């Protein structure tokens, strides 16, 4: 499955004196491409080298035998209860215990790209089905992901597709399909939105599943992005997926996740987009190209991106080995909402604004309070305060100086931090990764 990267702007990373494979880069890999790592995982990947470490992330690690049965049990119970809070807790369980953190990370990214809120959908079963589709296709072909999500029941409700009839077109799905999901602003005209809406007429849901009702469909000729025909919804998806702008938008989305917004130069972004087109919009190819690149491990791409609340929360739990026994995933879901990232309830079709928007005065105080709750053991029931000294001693650090250095390297990938763990987690650096 491994690819040979041939793009000139995406040269493979090779450790050197100036750019060594050190703890800082191992830490960076796990922070950006997953949800952090514990000391044993960091040391394992430090010893095995970048190629093996990235292989493990791409392939997924070993996972507890009962993970799959338990996550099914929790997810099914959430659906049966129709309680969205239980579904949020289910996803936190997956992010904490899945052996495939990269896919969970990508699922979270696509949840933001195809932002759908249960505040309007009001159907826990629909939201879970959509989430499963995002995960199943998170690292596959973008064409499969798009087709699965656009015909998804939650999306149909969210964007009023059920109201789109030949005698009264509703443009919501057509507009977001072009603006947010595929092309981006500037790559289509208002007339294209109107014509796409006509082509999508007939798509609706019955008995909780997608159907195409011919009686609702406008069979007349349409003109979409310069092409003429009696197009239907599937024709629209084929036309959109054939546009160069799709690869550009997906490349931009991926670079936002792995580098930060508007960080990657235009020429480098364009080369990734060209590669995506040549690889049939293969998301795994693109992600692998990024993770294996010199650019990803460059000095100016380490420790400078603001972590989203979930990365901040789950990352510290995993790093500090606070997952056995498990924390309350209900409490984690509540905390993430307080910090501005309420799963299954993004604020609009644009998703969460991210980056600097994560760090308002209110959420900064919230993150500090979360760190306090974590350290005092309030995320567990009964409460289990953290004793960093015990964790440090487990890995051979007996002196106070050694324990401070251990905490700094564990949480930040360097030994530059001072003070106790509480001080470190409340520092500005704790919000970067």
Image (tube, grey):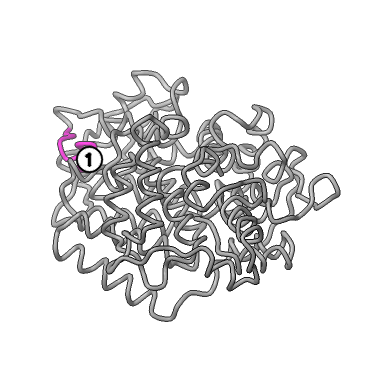
Q: Residue at x 52, y 42 (%)?
A: 257
Task: State the residue in front, 110 or 259.
Answer: 259
Q: Determine whether 152 is above or below 266 in the image.
A: below
Residue 390, given in percent of the width and then of the height, sits at 52, 70
**Residue 282 visible somewhere in the drawing:** no
User: Mark 1, residues whose alpha carbon is within 10 Å: few (<14), some, or many (≥20)?
Assistant: many
Q: Nearer the viewer, residue 406 or 363?
A: 406
> What residue did someone put label 1 on?
158
Name the quadrant of the C terminus: top right
Above or below 56: residue 355: above
Furthest-bottom residue in view?
A: 65
Q: Which image quadrant is residue 194 in? A: top left
Q: What range is drawn magenta here?
A: 157-165
Q: Decide if residue 238 is on the left or right side of residue 334.
A: right
Residue 94 in view: yes
Q: Residue at left 28%, top 35%?
A: 347
Left or right: 278 as drawn, with respect to 38: right
Report helix, strand or loop for mark 1.
Answer: helix
x then y, percent, for residue 155: 26, 44
Q: Is residue 56 above or below residue 104?
A: below
Q: Position of residue 244 (x, y in %)?
A: 55, 32
Residue found at x 55% / y 70%: 61
Determine the image quadrant of residue 197.
top left
Residue farthest right in this picture: 17
Q: Is residue 373 magenta?
A: no
Q: Is residue 73 above or below residue 409?
A: below
The residue depicted at 31 percent of the width and 34 percent of the height is 349
Q: In the depicted view, which residue is nearer to us: 255 or 397?
A: 397
């Amino acid at each position: 499955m491994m690819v040979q990267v041939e793009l000139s702007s995406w040269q493979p990373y090779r450790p050197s004196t100036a750019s060594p494979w050190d703890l800082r880069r191992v830490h960076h890999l796990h922070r950006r491409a997953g949800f952090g790592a514990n000391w044993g995982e960091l040391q394992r990947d430090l010893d095995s080298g970048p190629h093996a470490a990235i292989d493990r992330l791409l392939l997924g690690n070993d996972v507890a035998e009962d993970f799959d049965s338990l996550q099914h049990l929790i997810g099914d119970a959430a659906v049966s209860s129709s309680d969205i809070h239980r579904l949020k807790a289910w996803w936190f369980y997956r992010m904490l215990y899945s052996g495939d953190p990269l896919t969970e990370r990508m699922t979270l990214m696509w949840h933001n790209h195809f932002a759908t809120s249960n505040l309007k959908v009001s159907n826990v079963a629909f939201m879970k089905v959509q989430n499963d589709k995002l995960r199943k296709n998170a690292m596959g072909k973008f064409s499969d992901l798009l087709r699965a999500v656009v015909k998804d029941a939650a999306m149909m409700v969210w964007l009023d597709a059920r109201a789109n009839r030949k005698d009264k077109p509703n443009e919501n799905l057509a507009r977001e399909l072009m603006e947010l999901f595929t092309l981006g602003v500037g790559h289509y005209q208002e007339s294209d939105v109107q014509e796409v809406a006509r082509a999508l007429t007939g798509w609706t849901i019955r008995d909780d599943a997608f159907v195409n009702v011919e009686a609702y469909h406008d069979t007349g000729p349409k003109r979409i992005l310069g092409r003429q025909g009696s197009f239907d919804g599937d024709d629209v998806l084929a036309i959109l997926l054939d546009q160069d702008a799709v690869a550009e938008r997906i490349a931009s989305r991926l670079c936002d996740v792995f580098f930060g917004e508007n960080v990657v130069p235009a020429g480098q972004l364009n080369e990734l987009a060209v590669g995506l087109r040549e690889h049939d919009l293969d998301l795994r190819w693109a992600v692998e190209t990024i993770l294996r690149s010199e650019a990803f491990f460059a000095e100016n791409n380490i420790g400078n991106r603001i972590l989203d609340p979930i990365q901040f929360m789950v990352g510290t739990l995993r790093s500090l080995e606070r997952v056995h026994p498990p924390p309350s995933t209900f409490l984690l879901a509540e905390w993430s909402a307080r910090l501005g990232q309420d799963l299954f309830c993004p604020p609009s079709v644009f998703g969460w604004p991210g980056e600097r928007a994560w760090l308002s005065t209110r959420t900064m105080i919230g993150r500090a309070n979360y760190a306090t709750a974590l350290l005092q053991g309030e995320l567990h029931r009964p409460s289990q305060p953290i004793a960093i000294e015990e964790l440090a001693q487990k890995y051979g650090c007996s002196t106070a100086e050694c324990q401070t250095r251990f905490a700094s390297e564990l949480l930040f990938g360097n030994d530059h931090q001072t003070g106790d763990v509480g001080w470190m987690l409340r520092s500005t650096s704790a919000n970067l990764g």
